[in-house]
Amino acid sequence: MVRFAAGDVAAFDELYEHYEAPIYSFCLRFLSDADSAADAFQEIFMRVIDSRDSYQPRERFRSWVFTVARRVCVDRVRERAHEPLESARGIREGRSSYEEIDDRDEVERVLSVLAPEHREILLLHRYYGFSYGEIGEMVGATEAAVKQKTYRALLSLRNGRRPTP
Amino acid sequence: MTGRERIDCDAMSEVLLEQVLAGATDELNDEVRAHVSECARCQAEYDGLRQAYELLPPSSPAHPPALLRQRVRSYARESAETGVSTQTTMGLVRSKWRLATVGAGLAIAATLAIVMAKPDITPVGELAAMAPVFEAIDVSTGTVRSFGEFKGQTVLLNFWATWCIPCESEMASMERLYRRYRDDGLVVVAVSVDRESRHKVLQWAEQHGMTFPVFQDASGEVEQLYRTVGVPESFVIDRTGAIVMRISGPRVWDDPVHSALVRDVLNAKTPGS
């Protein structure tokens, strides 16, 4: 990021290559909607680009970018709660890329039964390897609270299980 | 468990959770295993956590569509080239509810209108409709012209009106975009939906320094043809005549995102090229 802030676009390309799939997967699994995920993904990286001059190197980039991702996704969930379904369209490449509704990522399908706050914690801990402490910093909670939520998330998953297709 | 400290069941929940999430469902340490085997409550808890954990499928990365990748990279390049943080501009474009603070006076008024207009973008992609050809009055000459004149070119088709406040600032950005890419083949056509005489529309266009073709659709037929829902509304049309993007609401057309979008369409290869 420091190199990118100095004008080295290749440095951004390196970052992007490394985080493209994890961030996109996170958005898809958090939002359970490909259109919203695409919109959120673009927003996340544009915020990363816009913030290059203010990024603090002492902070781990990975934690930072996932914090940005989490905030954008949470905002999308809140927006969707206030919008009629037909107007909640995001930016898409083309309808053919998103007609694979029945072939959603398995993780996405399984986690979609959970409330957003449980979904994000399981995603961040189980799939992206963040510690409880790191997650606590991202979501503004204590480590103990995050552990509790993780525990409840797993139990919710078990209790809210959908039959497999 | 002689000589060992008794494990508290409440503390066991946390231990079991850690072990299950680490995937170590079959590798409980001796102490934990011993407690679980003797405590029905903890056994049930452990079984429940294992069942839930086993519902979590393995992770496989998902990649975004290529167009998203192109846009992000284009935006990074544009930002790096301008050397200026575009956060303010992007706030104007992206934000639905936040007030952007771009400039003062007319820009601020236009910004408020833009924020309240709740802009929307719909790329049409592979199932793109072909842009309907129509005829309309060219306000500068008073003669009838056909949209078919622009066949084979990349066109930004914009529906607007002299009474539309957001259209006014958008038009300025369209003019800047046009000047940037007209030598690369970009065509901009602005269709006014005003019902008044063309002279009023022409006067407005001249006052605002528009150098691209301005048509007038006083009958509303072209609006119906394109099924517009209001003004401003824009269509990006590629060289094959396909509508590749439909944008409801105003845009800052020469900002990095939209500039990159238009450039991508200009540079896109068409069959046979």
Image (cartoon, coloured by chain):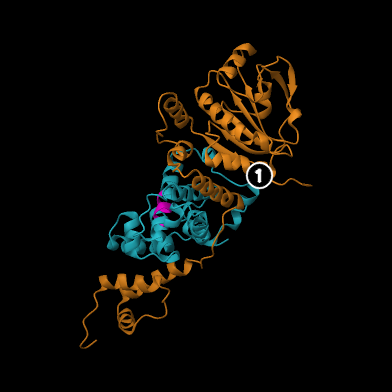
Screen quadrant of the N terminus of chain A: bottom left
Q: At 57% from the left edge and 31% from the top edge, which residue is drawn?
A: B176
Q: Please rate how many residues cluster around mark 1, counting C-alpha atoms within 10 Å: few if below 14, some from 14 to 19, many from 20.
A: some
Q: Is residue A156 visible?
A: no
Q: Is residue A70 magenta?
A: yes
A22 relative position to B178: left or right: left
B35 relative position to A61: left or right: left
Rendered orange, the chain in question is B
Quick check: B50 above or below A141? below
Nearer to me, B80 or A34: B80
> SS for tag 1?
helix
Q: At 41% from the left edge and 44% from the top edge, which residue is drawn?
A: A78
Quadrant in which residue A158 is drawn: bottom left
Please name the amino acid that badge 1 sits on: Gly
Nearer to me, B55 or B124: B124
Q: Position of residue B31 (x, y in %)?
A: 30, 83
Nearer to me, B92 or A156: B92
B168 relative position to B38: left or right: right
What residue sits right under mark 1 in the picture?
Answer: B125
Quick check: B50 above or below A144? below
Q: Is residue A98 magenta?
A: no
Region rendered in magenta: A66-71
Q: Main secondary structure of the magenta part?
A: helix
Q: Position of residue B34 (x, y in %)?
A: 31, 83
Rendered cyan, the chain in question is A
Q: Is residue B164 visible?
A: yes
